[in-house]
Image: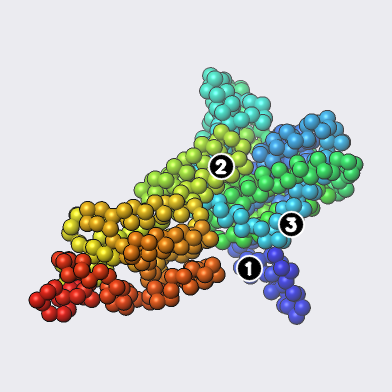
Amino acid sequence: MPLPSFSAVSPSRLAARLFGDWVHEVSRGTLKADALAGLLGAVLVLPQAIAFATLAGLPPQFGLYTAVLPCAVAALAGSSRHVMSGPTNANSLALYAMLAPLAAVGTPQYVQLALVVTLMVGVMQAAIGLFRLGAVANFISPAALQGFTAGAALLIAVHASHDMLGIALPAGQSAGTVLVEVVRRIELMNPAALLVGAAALGCALAVRRWRRQWPFMLLGLAVGTLVGWWVSLGSLWPPVRTVGRVDSPWPPLTVPAVSWQQVPELASLAFALTIVALGQSFSIAKAVAARSGQRIDANREFIGQGLSNVVGSFSSSYVSCGSLNRSMPNLEAGARTPLAAVFSAGLLVLLVAFSAPVLALIPMAAIAALLLLVAWGLFDLPRWRTLWRVSRGEFAIAAATLAATVTLRLEVAILFGTMLSLVSYLHRTSRPAMRTMGFDSRIAHDRPFVVIDGHPPGALPECPQLKLLRMEGSIYFGATAHVADRLHELRKGGEGGVQKHLLVMSKSMNFIDLAGAELWEAEMSARRAMGGDLYFHRPRPAVLDAWARIGFIDRLGEDHLYRDKRSALADIVPRLDPGICARCEARIFFDCPPRPGTSVGEGI
């Protein structure tokens, strides 16, 4: 990403270059909306941050640290207006799995390893953006993204289900384990937790339905907290689990330090975590952008994520990336600019500092209810129905990615869906369409070119000597086998005999590589060996350049390249065997010689 020149730039334009065009849209209304969305984000991250830090083998406060400065930096330096970064389940699990063999979990040495890996991840992420390698993220197809989003929705719903039902489970379990344990322990369900969750969910749905402009998720959380407090006054049901006491989240400054001997090993771990974090972050950014209509700059997003982790490594934070659990609620809550993430970071510190007793009363069931609401919106059943109607292949890719998301690690699921999309694309492009063309003789005036394929045999007769073939697609190494087989079949001929001459209508032949150029060289030699020839109508400039570089045009002859069909036929038809033309009953072209005893021009 080139560094902008800041000379003679007004403060507003300078801010826009640094942070994005959204700075011009900031107003009292956007600040209010962002503050309310940020408040919800701060409340939502409280229990998640504590749980994820424990999952990573770090002290609980490290999760809160990761939700402060890294969250603000990623939002301001990135390109998405709604993505909130911070600790995530996948990053926490991956960090624990990588560092546990190197140091005792929870020890100062383990903490230092986590901080150094975070610094390395940040540097690698920023480098990917600075060298403009973010374009690789564009290969995450819409179908794979649809499956990933729906799979993430199911994961959110499954992991929220046990809190919604008041069933206590250990942190860090897989979605399958959580689901099995919830079913197995269903008789231990706490009716009070279900009541709290239902109240929060019902309030949020009602407000969203009739007062869309109100902060429905925050109001739902408030109602759930009030119901939870009311339930706790009685002794009819067991107590509802709450967020509990939270220590101050203000991050102390640190300097990551490890021995130089450990750097090579940590670098390989950091590279793997970089792939994990970037895959999640950009997939989440694209998923959120698909709902908000915003365009995402992959390189800027990667730079933002990299800077957030660099800053985080010096502020007692571990690897952070975009969080779907917070980004979608942030969008749904009405966030307008990245300042919502800044508000979330600041309000998290203030909430814990001044409202710790109140925050401790927030029921986990109320938070789980709001996450279920988010999960339902993410699944997007209408889009699945549209995908089924439009493309069964894309639907299959989305379904496979969904299955991978709920059964494998998130980064593996993203890679799996992307690979499926690329394989599907390569399969389609490896079989370019090759359509037989001709004239519709049933139209008396100016008989147009039409595709003969698909019509009943004999309905649209062909010239017995000249084949008209329209190429649609690129002729590259992956497609040459299919094209060569089709050309070989045409040279074998059918019931009407062999059409020795071939005119290729090539304006839709977008690209050829060396293998494609050699294929046409072989076809020219085969046609001339059988007494015919090869011609091209309107080949693209890129194709002509490739042919010129290997000398194919010199061997073919420039007189075998035509700008329009009429001039091509006017030149080719006289080259055909006059004996066959004399016996031909089809008379396909206007340029066909007249039958014996008739006048010139009787042909089509």
Mark 1 or mark 2, whichever is nearer to me: 2
**Mark 3 and mark 2: span between their CA atoms?**
25 Å
Answer yes or no: do the residues labelled 1 and 2 have beta carbons within 8 Å? no
User: Label 2's element?
Assistant: helix
Residue 217's x, y, as percent? 56, 46
Q: Is residue 470 visible?
A: no
**Quadrant of the image for the C terminus?**
bottom left
Comes first in the chain, label 1 or label 3: 1
Residue 592's x, y, as percent? 21, 74
Q: Nearer the viewer, residue 592 or 374?
A: 592
User: Label 3's element?
Assistant: helix
Answer yes or no: do the residues labelled 3 and 2 have beta carbons within 8 Å? no
Q: Relative to 568, is 377 on the left or the right?
A: right
- Counting labels gives 3
Label 2 sits on residue: 416
User: Residue 257 sits in which quadrant?
Assistant: top right
